[in-house]
Image: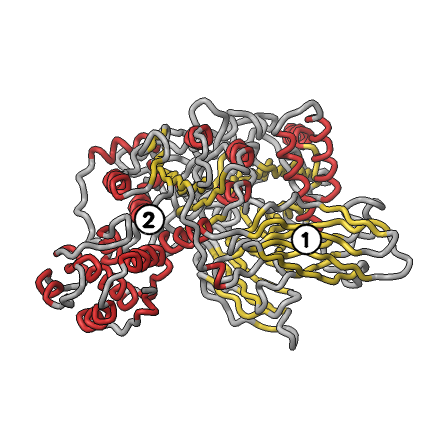
Amino acid sequence: MVNCCGLVSEKNEPVPLKSISVQLQVRDHVTSVSSSLQYVNEEERPLEAVFVFPLPAEAAVCHFSAKIGEQEIVAELQDKQSARDQYDDALSSGQQAFLLEESDESSDVFKLSVGCLSPGQIAVITIVYVMELSIQADDALRFCLPAVLNPRYTPTASAAGVPEVSSASVIPYTLSLSVDVRSSDRISRLDSSCPLDPLVFLDAQHTHATVTLSAGHRFDKDVELLLYYENAHQPTAVVEAGAAAAQTGSLMADPVLMISLYPEFPADVMSSLASQGEFVFVVDRSGSMDCTMHHGKDAQMRIDSARDTLLLLLKSLPMGCYFNIYGFGSHFESFFPQSVVYSEDTMEEALKRVKNMKADMGGTEILQPLKHIYSQPCFPDHPRQLFIFTDGEVWHTKELLDLVKSHAYSHRCFSFGIGEGASTALITGMAREGSGHAQFITGADRMQPKVMQSLRFALQPAVDNISVDWTVPEGVTVDMLSPPISALFQGQRALIYAQLKGQSSGKTEGAVTVKYRLKDQPVTNQLQFTLKPTEDTGRTIHQLAARSVIRSLELEERAGGADAEAVRSRIVELSVQAGVSSAHTAFIGVNKDSTQTVKGPLLQRRVPVPHMLGMSGCFPKMMMCAMGVPQVTFHSRPCAGVRMGDSSDVMMDDSSDAESDESDAASDPEPEPQADPLLQLVSLQKASGCWELNAALAAVFGKTEDEVTNHRPAQADGSVWATVLALIWLHTCRSGDQVEWQFVAMKAASWIRSQKPDGLTPCVCDGNVLLGGHVTQEALGI
């Protein structure tokens, strides 16, 4: 097998990418990211390269430039087809040209064409994008610089996908990264999955700080940054000044306001869980799920982690709800023809099938199972909760998101991206359009805690009846740029953008009142803001506001209608005006000042893709990307050849997943690893919440059945005694994993209370003695 990374020579040696430099400018909850990539043509002839790389789903590219020697070419944003034509015309005449465009299928994949580089030339490509920072369960704001791009699975009948390339074993270039944070809130700390230099505060209020990545970092995994503010739940309103040079009355000329809303859920709300609902679990069973969760020692296979997670979910569901489980790949199947009532019998039947689940269903086509689920009628008084698990190697992202959005009023969607490289557009988009919550399981993360956290969200009430009211001086109006927010769940944050139009002759202050309802209790927040900010703080908020409007218009366009062409024109106009990327625009740069044209045909280069018969399909699915390691394809053409949008441009063989299925069947089964005692205990629990007193349960405690039986108080029923012991063991031996077993324990405590047993106190005392615990009845919830 050949290990390739970025551009490769005829001897399969990585050549062009020499260094990556990344600068982050963080302002409150948003960031501007500037990435500069230096590479060189070490071939003896001119070449054209195509980089395919990921960006976060909600990122907006706002600058693209290329520096060749001392000559810098700053690209212009144009209508996409015009940009493609100009690019081809430039290459036909031997001029250097650069084209950057968003994929037609997925908003988090970009393609960069670099044309007509002379032998020995060094090029520095700079891409700047802005994005909202996602929020984590512990209130951290998260930024991720991806090192891996997984190709999106493309069905045979569809157009071009993202090409595959094998993973690199050696990273031959350097990475430097610096972060500058400015906030209206005090900065507590900044953590990372990679070594950082100490955080340096630049003011006494701790609202301005910088940090850099420690020298010597090998960019062989995602770089994750976690930023913590002191008052994360405090609503904020930030105003960004308009650009003086912009056209009067335009979005870029007026001030733009960004409101951050991140409601805090009181303890009594957190503890109130619903007992009704329809829970549908949709699990990716494509060949790529037979890869490991990460590249570290003892990494679990993705499908194995999904099976363990389903065990926890099935044991945690409340009695009387409805549930079903779907598996999908090139086709799909469901455990039951339609959702069934959760009972001991249906739970046991589902668990038997979960144990036999394998990554044996070929490709990754999620559209059909979702259509089937949405075609099923909902159960009255049982709101539908959809849990989707996938490694994100799906291509038709926009069509999927439109489908989820069209059923937004009949369900909530909780999505989970498994492994590095999962499509952020897909995972965050499904949760956003389905008013749910998105989680990413990367590196050494365990899937179970994050999934159980989302289950808590699904069982809890949400913030609803959200309204925004404005108080502004006469002569000033407010134009809302964000779509209405229907609901927010615990752990979700909303950023609301608004344009401030007009001028006030007197007052320079305004106010916004945000109201919402949480568990039938009204909540009101009023925020003050200035109409005329004095400090020029860039254009990040304006660009993200424009991106929000553009995305809404793109959804409107895809929904169809007589005015589709008018909507497209509005998208192009706003995209060019604001300088941010869209589905209908592209950045084009041509070196018109070059005194010497490039002669001769462009050199053909295509990254070799080893045929992975006999392997699981993960190696050819690893891609090093340009905001990490670039995936590169070269065109075999004279200077005026194939355009980026043509189906012959970049093709992906969708057979790798299917091939992996054959190899799975042919390979010898590996011995089963020793099960986690926590999962063993959970697997023994009944649907009602109780445990039975037997040898299997005693083995979890490290005891014999006789030892456990002989310590039982005389007045205690066997199942009550077993259930009390299970609760004591959880609190004593696995207290750090409470987020995983919280619902299991709540069901157990509820079952014990329903039995109204005598002599609970001696049970708890004797159980503590037997298991070496010190847990009180109050702590056990009984």
In this orientation, which residue lies closer to the viewer: 376 or 671? 376
Q: What residue is rendered at 25% in x and 71% in y? A: 761
In this orientation, which residue lies closer to the viewer: 393 or 511? 511
Residue 642: percent from the left, percent from the top?
Answer: 57, 26
Left or right: 632, with 688 as reference point: right
Image quadrant where residue 546 sits: top right
What separation in Å lies between label 1 and label 2 (alpha carbons)?
39 Å
Res. 25 in view: no
Number of numbered markers: 2
Q: What residue is rendered at 51% in x and 33% in y? A: 400
Image quadrant where residue 184 sits: bottom right
Of callouts 1 and 2, the N-terminal one = 2
Which part of the image, by quadrant, shows the C terminus? bottom left
Q: Amino acid at mark 1?
A: Thr
Which part of the image, by quadrant, shows the N terminus? top left
Q: Which residue in the protein does label 1 denote?
A: 540
Q: Which residue in the protein does label 2 denote?
A: 309
Residue 161: percent from the left, percent from the top?
Answer: 48, 31
Res. 519 in view: yes
Among all residues in the image, which is located at the extreme bottom?
Answer: 204
Q: Amino acid at mark 2?
A: Thr
Residue 431: percent from the left, percent from the top?
Answer: 51, 44
Foreground: disc 1 or disc 2: 2
Label 1, residues with CA under 10 Å away: few <14, some 14-19, many ≥20: many
Label 2, residues with CA under 10 Å away: few <14, some 14-19, many ≥20: many
760 versus 45 height, above or below: below
In this orientation, which residue lies closer to the viewer: 446 or 115? 446
Q: What residue is rendered at 84% in x and 52% in y? A: 476
Disc number for residue 460 = none
Residue 419: percent from the left, percent from the top?
Answer: 40, 48
106 versus 424 height, above or below: above
